[in-house]
Image (cartoon, rainbow, N blue to C red):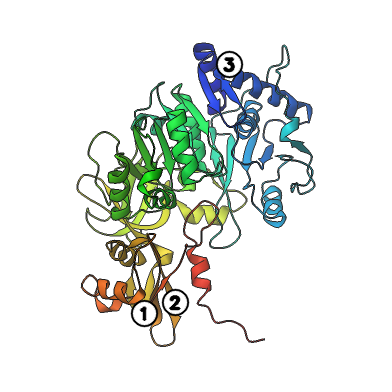
Amino acid sequence: MSHIGYFAWDLASERGDAPCLRDDRLHLSYQQFAERVDAFAAQLSEKGVGRGDVVAIMLPNRAELLVALMASWRIGAAATPVNPTFTANEAEYQIDDAAAVLVVNEGSDAPSAGRPTIAVDEMASTSRAGWTPNGTPGGDDLALLIYTSGSTGRPKGVMLSHDNLQFMSSSMAQHLSLTPEDHCLLILPLFHVNAICVSFLSPMLTSGQLSVTGRFSPARFFDDVARLRPTYFSAVPTIYALLASQPDATTSDLSSLRFAVCGAAPISKELLDRAEQRFGLVIVEGYGLTEGTCASACNPPDGVRKLGTVGPALPGQTLAIVDEAGSPLPAGTAGEVVIRGANVMRGYLGRPDETERTIVDGWLHTGDVGKLDEDGYLTLVDRIKDMIIRGGENIYPKEIENALATHDGVLEAAVIGAPHEVYGEVPVAYVVAYPDAQVTGDNLAAHLVSRLTKVKLPVAIHIVDALPRNPVGKIDKPGLRSRHRPQPVS
């Protein structure tokens, strides 16, 4: 197989009528999926799209998004998935920055930045007799442009090659022991690399199947699992928190699930244990970055799982912990997590200086603080940029969040540094409680006294209905910090 974009044709000849992909509208076999990809690839070619071009795909989760993605690869083009909830300004920034030559969207009212468009309802679905793609892309050719959430400024386009995707998908399939009997329920947004690699490409490479669910809700999730009988799904901590907080009566038959994956953001040991006990389910926590094509460490579904860690390095990758000078640190010592392997991105689109700062001598510098144990299992401490410096003392918010999570009434917690005239920064906590839990800032403060030294105690604990999120479901800490910035006087 020369690159990831050709796997459907290899599989179609072997699996033919076997189930491949379904959503609320379509139910496609491998052969039907391959035919739709060919049909749309031919349509793109007729519009002048070819090798080296970029196609922007601004669609909600549905089968046609994956058809468009694969069709772009089929003709040697790259794809950039655009968050369908973006404002026109946000979408047009990404389309312009990616230099997309065409936009696939939901219709004439959708943003296009002046590019030609193909509406989803106008996508060709019947393959053209005798049509074949003109040329074969190379493994190092650009396949995906995934835009980071932009928490530190304008979003950056992460350049991922066919080799990156092939390596990552194969690595995840191996680590998760996927077989043709596996069936993934996709509930994460497809503008994020986690959904593309873990939920789409990995089961496809192993001849499994994929069901694309509609907009997530706990009721929809339980119904889909009982009806479709998937064997696994991948989700973020927010989703596990929502599921774990549902009344017992809402839980349905989850016996088909072999395991679940948790990624994109850290999950507390308490929530992980609560979700596992509630649903009788193995949940493996993983860790990775878009710049590392999704995942670099993951606890195994079968084997030693260490709660509180994100597992060992995935096959073919190396993890290390380094100090500020880039020198390796011994096991048990906290420092910056760096990653090496065929999963490391080509770089940031049009940003060579940032690429050079991020990839040093082949090592991807993550900006995350962590430590490795003697078995190579990684424990994350925090983000370097989220560290609070109180009067010259370093405080990691995750330590305070973990302490808050030990309270039975705490569902989620986020801690940020707020400006302070004397100390520079002080910790402030935002907490979401379980439904009907009697939780106040005062009793949480009392709960922390025996668990944290005085300097780490939050100066304020706010009980809120929900934590703000960025487009991929991570807690929006920059947004929380902005609440504490001095407001300009009008």
Upstream in sequence: badge 3 or badge 1: 3
| Callout 3: SS | helix
Q: Are marks 1 and 2 in contact (CB under 8 Å)?
A: yes
Please state the horizontal and vertical placement of residue 209, each as a whole percent of the image.
48, 25
- The residue wearing badge 3 is 31
Going by the numbered disc 2, the residue's amino acid type is Ala
Going by the numbered disc 1, the residue's amino acid type is Val
Q: Is residue 153 left or right of residue 336?
A: right
Please state the horizontal and vertical placement of residue 412, each as a whole percent of the image.
38, 60
Upstream in sequence: badge 1 or badge 2: 2
Residue at horizontal 34 percent and vertical 68 percent from the top: 438
Going by the numbered disc 3, the residue's amino acid type is Gln
Query: 445 or 111: nearer the eye?
Result: 445
Distance from the alpha carbon under mark 3 to that under mark 1? 60 Å
The local crowd at label 3, few if under 14, some if 14 to 19, many if 20 or more residues have their Cα within 10 Å, is many
Query: 278 or 184: nearer the eye?
Result: 278
Mark 1 or 2: the one toward you: 1
Query: 327 or 475: nearer the eye?
Result: 475
Distance from the alpha carbon under mark 2 to that under mark 3? 56 Å
Residue at horizontal 72 percent and vertical 54 percent from the top: 88
62 w.r.t. 466: above or below: above
- The residue wearing badge 1 is 459
- The residue wearing badge 2 is 418
35 w.r.t. 381: above or below: above
Upstream in sequence: badge 2 or badge 3: 3
Q: Is residue 192 left or right of residue 172?
A: right
The local crowd at label 2, few if under 14, some if 14 to 19, many if 20 or more residues have their Cα within 10 Å, is many
Q: How many numbered discs, if any?
A: 3
